[in-house]
Image (cartoon, rainbow, N blue to C red):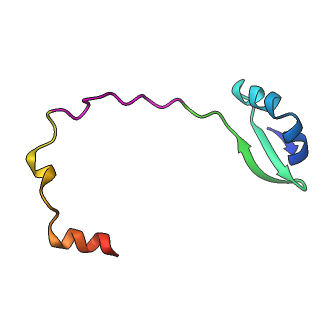
Amino acid sequence: MTTFNIHEAKTQFSRLVERALAGEEIVIAKAGKPLVRLAVVEERRRREPGLAKGRLTDAFFEPLPEDELRAWER
């Protein structure tokens, strides 16, 4: 784990991103106190059109029962 203060992180941001992408754990601190960790975002699976085709019934379009509607009002 490598720690950088905020000012350092601002001036070297592109390099820090590259280091994080390479697997290094980067922590950004203020006055020596760790605040945040720079981490790689895992790629999300793309949504595919028609994924729910044939899985929805006509009940999906019916109004909710009164007790469920009241639960949403809270």
Figure label count: 0
Q: Is residue 24 magenta?
A: no
Specify the quadrant that holds the N terminus.
top right
Span highlighted in magenta in the image: 43-53
Q: Is residue 14 above or below residue 32?
A: above
Residue at the image position 10 percent from the left and 51 percent from the top: 59
Q: Tell me the chief SS of the magenta region.
A: loop
Q: Is residue 70 above or below residue 1?
A: below
Specify the quadrant that holds the C terminus.
bottom left
Left or right of 40 in this view: 6:
right
Residue at the image position 80 percent from the left and 52 percent from the top: 34
Left or right of 53 in this view: 42:
right
Residue at the image position 59 percent from the left and 34 percent from the top: 41
Is 2 or 58 nearer to us in this picture?
A: 58
Left or right of 51 in this view: 46:
right
- Res. 71 image quadrant: bottom left
Left or right of 18 in this view: 46:
left
Residue 22 x, y percent position in the rendering: 72, 23
Residue at the image position 25 percent from the left and 74 percent from the top: 70
Is 33 or 15 nearer to us in this picture?
A: 15
- Res. 23 image quadrant: top right
- The residue sitting at the left extreme is 58
Residue 43 x, y percent position in the rendering: 52, 29
Q: Is residue 44 magenta?
A: yes
Residue 67 x, y percent position in the rendering: 19, 73
Residue 19 x, y percent position in the rendering: 77, 27
Q: Is residue 66 above or below residue 40?
A: below
